[in-house]
């Protein structure tokens, strides 16, 4: 069996703060998404107040890790909220672990509206600098029903595709869209020295689009490990 532990990145009493592209500042995570939608201005910068101190146990765990996985999760209010804690990004860079960024399946209203996977990578680099991870894992399964029909999939796949399309309609009503690499993005990401692993990672449960945990763990533990050892 596998045992794990959850550690707070800091033991301080902290608040998340963001600055929007239009200069408006928002203090406190609960109001960020609503303010982004109200201002119709994307997030530019994430910060933590007051000046935080990283939990030493977290830094030690990063140093001793075999694999470090960043994501999936809310880009600004979860992922970057942790990475901007002083010392965390430096610890990740110093670690000899394999470092993997798992891209989200969908954009998130009020947080990553109209963003691409490359935009998410650039946002992390804007806050942490380049070279934080070696590998990108992302989904390449389209949930668009028309694309399935064009691909002439079999009846079982079409039935699954219809369930996916129904879930997609729900997300699109909330202005969320799928995150799938374009050829141009793929080229630019590889030019950064990042190895890309694309596969079908989608699971739809009760109309919610989620990463398939089994597929994701298999690609990380099996395929990526073997591929990186070969390089």
Image (tube, rainbow, N blue to C red):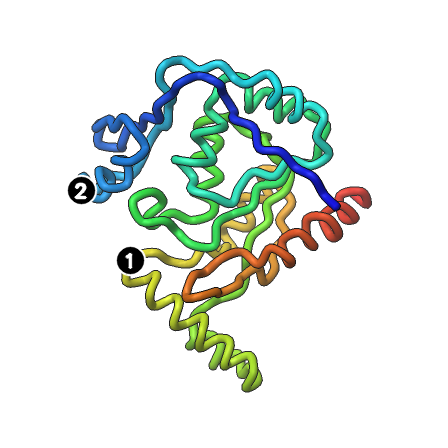
The correct choice, above or below, for 33 with respect to 164 in the image is above
Residue nearest the viewer, comparing 56 with 25: 56
Classify mark 2: residues with Cα within 10 Å, few (<14), some (14-19) or many (20+).
few
The circle on residue 112 is none
Q: Which residue extends farthest bottom? A: 155
Residue 122 in picture, x, y percent from top left: 46, 36
Name the image quarter holding residue 195: top right
Residue 129 in picture, x, y percent from top left: 51, 26
Task: Identify residue for label 2.
Answer: 38
Q: Which secondary structure lies at badge 2?
A: helix
Residue at 48% in and 65% down: 204
Query: Which part of the image, by quadrant, shows the C terminus?
Result: top right
**Mark 2 → mark 1, Cα distance in angstroms:** 15 Å
- Name the N-terminal-most of marks 2 and 1: 2
Q: Position of residue 100 (x, y in %)?
A: 62, 40
Q: Residue at x 55, y 50 (%)?
A: 186
The image shows residue 125 at horizontal and vertical percentages of: 48, 31
**Element under disc 1:** loop
Relative placement, left or right, of 205 versus 56 is left
Residue furthest out toward the left: 38
Q: Residue at x 69, y 39 (%)?
A: 3
**Foreground of the two, 164 or 42:** 164
Q: Which residue is mark 1?
A: 174
Image: 194 above or below 161:
above
Q: Is 154 placed above or below 132 here?
A: below
Q: Is residue 103 left or right of residue 91?
A: left
Q: Front-most of 112 and 190?
A: 112
């Amino acid at each position: 069996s596998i045992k794990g532990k959850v550690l707070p990145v800091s033991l301080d009493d902290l608040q998340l703060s963001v600055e929007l592209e239009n200069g408006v500042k928002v203090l406190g995570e609960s109001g960020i998404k609503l303010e982004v939608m109200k201002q119709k201005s994307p997030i530019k910068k994430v910060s933590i107040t007051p000046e935080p101190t990283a939990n030493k146990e977290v830094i030690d765990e990063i140093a001793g890790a075999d694999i470090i996985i960043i994501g999936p999760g809310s880009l600004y209010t979860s992922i970057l909220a942790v990475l901007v804690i002083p010392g965390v990004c430096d610890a990740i860079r110093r670690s000899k672990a394999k470092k993997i960024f798992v891209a989200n399946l969908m954009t998130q209203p009020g947080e990553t509206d109209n963003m691409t996977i490359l935009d998410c990578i650039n946002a992390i680099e804007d806050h942490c600098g380049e070279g934080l991870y070696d590998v990108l894992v992302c989904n390449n399964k389209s949930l668009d029903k028309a694309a399935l029909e064009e691909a002439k999939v079999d009846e079982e796949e079409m039935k699954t595709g219809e369930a996916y399309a129904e879930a997609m309609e729900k997300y699109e009503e909330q202005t969320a869209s799928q995150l799938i690499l374009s050829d141009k993005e793929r080229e630019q990401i590889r030019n950064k020295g990042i190895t890309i692993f694309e596969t079908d990672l989608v699971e739809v449960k009760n109309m919610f689009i989620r990463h398939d945990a089994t597929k994701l763990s298999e690609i990380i533990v099996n395929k990526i490990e073997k591929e990186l050892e070969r390089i």
